[in-house]
Image (spheres, rainbow, N blue to C red):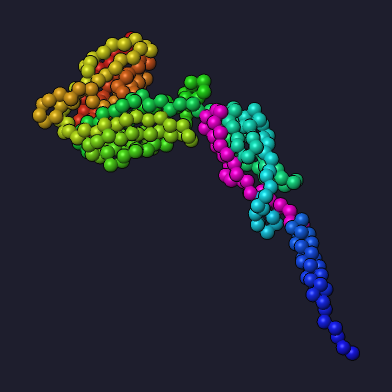
Amino acid sequence: MRLTPLSTSARGARAIGAIVALSVTLVAAGCSRKPATIDISPKKLKIYGLERSSRLSARLLDKKGEPFETGTPTWSSSNPAIVEAEAGGRVVAKKEGKAMVTATYEGVQAQVPVEIVDVSTIEVSTPALTLIGPPGTSVPLSFTVKDSKQQPVSIAPTWSSQNPKVATVSDKAQVTSVSAGTTTIVAKIGDLQGGTDVTVKIHDISRLEVRPATALVRVGDAQHFTVTAYGSDGIAIPEVAATFQSSNAAVATVDSGGVATGRQAGATTIHAELAGVKAEATLLVN
């Protein structure tokens, strides 16, 4: 029996049939691949400040953990009065509190807890500070964190110096000189910032004077004490930054700027210190 070779057209038809069969198989395999999980980043979110926003990202993964190149989940919030969830994963802070934000795609869901903290401003009492003394001289900064109603809130900022070769700052807002120059001390809570410009001047300190030496205020009134420093040359350096403390905080308190406030009738001593040199004044409250 003699076999007859296939014609060119027959071979082409077989090849096309094989390609069609393979395509059908691939399409069927692709259709059977479904999302199994949604990976949201970050896993939890805290937003400081009302009407501020952040963005969540989501990846669709199959049961093997392989990502899908297409597909967009929808977003929703368990409490839109606190957190609004928008298309694309953008979330907007509306009110202080907590809510769950959910991403959904073809019946698959994932959730992220979102917390909103009502904070509006960081007010540093000294917008510009000149730090005079030998290297290592330290003074504290006074600051107030306020919410959207301008009420103080107990939230501690993180602190940093833009030029730590000039001055550093501790997590307690204590500024310490390193070398002559200028820097900016920044307080930060989330995306919210406040701060003060600091100029460092290197100078020896041999004596301090607190003025006025004696002051009288009523309960609720304030008295500003200033410090004059003297170097070994005897030349006065007026109104230098110093560390202040009241010997009796029940009678009067004093902030880092030297402003003392009467609390109840009595007497207290206002202590000032700079570079290890001390001086004092008397405050009477009636």
Residue 53, horizontal then vertical, whole percent = 56, 33
The part of the image, by quadrant, that contains residue 112 is top right
Closer to us: 121 or 171: 121
Answer above or below: position of 268 versus 44: above
Locate the C terminus and report the quarter of the image it occupies.
top left
Q: Residue furthest right?
A: 1
What residue appears at the point 59 percent right and 32 percent down from the top-left corner?
92
Residue 144, horizontal then vertical, whole percent = 42, 26
Locate the N terminus and report the quarter of the image it occupies.
bottom right
Q: Residue furthest front?
A: 8
Residue 82, horizontal then vertical, whole percent = 62, 29
Q: Is residue 92 left or right of residue 217?
A: right
Closer to us: 139 or 42: 42
Answer above or below: position of 68 versus 160: below
Queried whether the magenta region covers residue 198, the answer comes back as no
Closer to us: 120 or 145: 120
Q: Is residue 247 left or right of residue 39?
A: left
Answer above or below: position of 211 versus 131: above
Residue segment shown in magenta: 32-59
Queried whether the magenta region covers residue 42, the answer comes back as yes
What residue appears at the point 62 percent right and 39 percent down from the top-left corner?
89
Q: Residue furthest left?
A: 233
What residue appears at the point 34 percent right and 10 percent down from the top-left corner?
218
Report the label total: 0
What residue appears at the point 67 percent right and 35 percent down from the top-left corner?
77
The part of the image, by quadrant, that contains residue 279 is top left
Residue 222, horizontal then vertical, whole percent = 33, 14
Q: Is residue 245 visible?
A: no
Q: Is residue 231 left or right of residue 138?
A: left
